Image (tube, grey):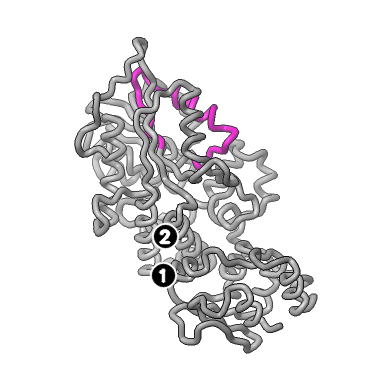
Amino acid sequence: MTLAQIFEKIVGPDAGVEFAAYDGSKAGSLGADIRIEVKSPVAVAYLAQAPGELGLARAYVSGHLDVHGDMYTLLDRMWSLTLNDLPLGEKVAAIRSLGAKPLLMRVPLPPQEMRRSALARLGSRHAKQRDAEAIHHHYDVSNRFYEWVLGPSMAYTCAVFPSADASLEDAQFTKFDLVARKLGLEPGMRLLDVGCGWGGMVMHAAKHYGVKGLGVTLSRQQAEWAQKAIAEAGLSELAEVRYTDYRDVAETGFDRVSSIGLTEHIGKDNLPSYFSFLYDKLKPGGRLLNHCITRPTGTEKTFNKGGFINRYVFPDGELESVGYLVRQMEDIGYEIRHEENLREHYALTLREWCANLDAHWDEAVAEVGQGTARVWRLYMAGCVVGFERNKVQLHQVLGVKLDEDSSARVPLRPSLDWP
């Protein structure tokens, strides 16, 4: 059985994708706008030894499999089709037809893949040192690379698009301002922003609301970039970004807390202590805005140990349902005052990031290497499909720490421009 025959057995003849392999075999739609090229036996070895998304990712990231055309379009067309979809008998027949060599060939893992053994040496999942290494793996790639992908806002979280044709910068401003308005920021307040990235929220709060903000991140490169940006903006008296674990923040008595894109790194077992820690940092009447990626229901797997995202993008990342998160917050003592799903907004955000990466592809490859650039192209395009097809969602949940009189200190109704 040729590689082309195996491909056609998996995807069918009408997938709108052209296929070519080093063995000279071809399949699919000749002249299609998307073309997959298997360039060497190493790609086959990756697929034989890890059938499914991980083997495909290894082959692509290592450069032994090429995709010609738009990555999003490919993933959208082949969303439900992987080697895992083959019946066992056909899978065995396909592997046998290739011979024993792909199974026995020793192929190195791409250097971009996080080795489980390396993480295990740093302790159990979400131990401080292990969390620091997981964050370093993804966020300390290159600030210049992130500038190309994220744009001037350097905001690496879901934007909020006031209209479908809004620019990414307008949408990121809208996101920060939506968080600020939900929190009810006022001059003189103190804000703690955990997992602050490059400091976008603390700078927005300082510049537009006169709030004194402290942001914390486990990425040294993020902290250094943010402190420089804060100084250049003349906001040093109000805004600070600190390179530290949020669990090591000693200050307390904050009026507001924002957590934008951190909960995904906390872990299911640690959520009660996480929300409790933030609750204790708030004054009575204080508010927490939690913004994070979630699963659409509580039935999906929250942690995929052998998946592409865990191995290459967000080691130890875990996604819960919004219902589970709300229950944890309520059990700590928060009163939930508002919740909304921004799923479509994250698909739009990721599309902008994909376009930015493509526009700076040559510079990105020169900066971080082809393998890392390919990880990002594959992961972001896949996430667009995931959000569009409701595989993942993005929720903002506003919780309040009631004061001694059980008052939430919130308006009877949100203002007309919120949400």
**Nearest to the observer: residue 7 or residue 151:** 7
Residue 122 point in image, percent of width and height: 66, 42
Residue 31 point in image, percent of width and height: 46, 86
SS category of the residue bearing label 1: helix
SS category of the residue bearing label 2: helix
Q: Is residue 388 above or below residue 205?
A: below
In the displayed structure image, the side of residue 195 where residue 171 appears, left or right: left
**Nearest to the observer: residue 18 or residue 279:** 18
- Mark 2: amino acid: Phe
How many residues crowd around disc 1 within 10 Å: few (fewer than 14), some, or many (20 or more)?
some
Residue at position x 39%, y 49% from top? Answer: 343
In the image, the segment drawn in magenta is 264-290
Residue at position x 53%, y 44% from top? Answer: 319
Q: Is residue 354 above or below residue 211?
A: below
Asked whether 206 falls inside the magenta stretch, the response is no
Residue at position x 47%, y 28% from top? Answer: 329
- Which residue lies under the disc numbered 2? 145
Residue 403 point in image, percent of width and height: 35, 15
From the image, which quarter does the C terminus lie in?
top left
Which quadrant of the view contains residue 105?
bottom right
Choose the circle earlier in sequence order: 1 or 2.
Answer: 2
Q: Is residue 143 visible?
A: yes
- Which residue lies under the disc numbered 1? 361
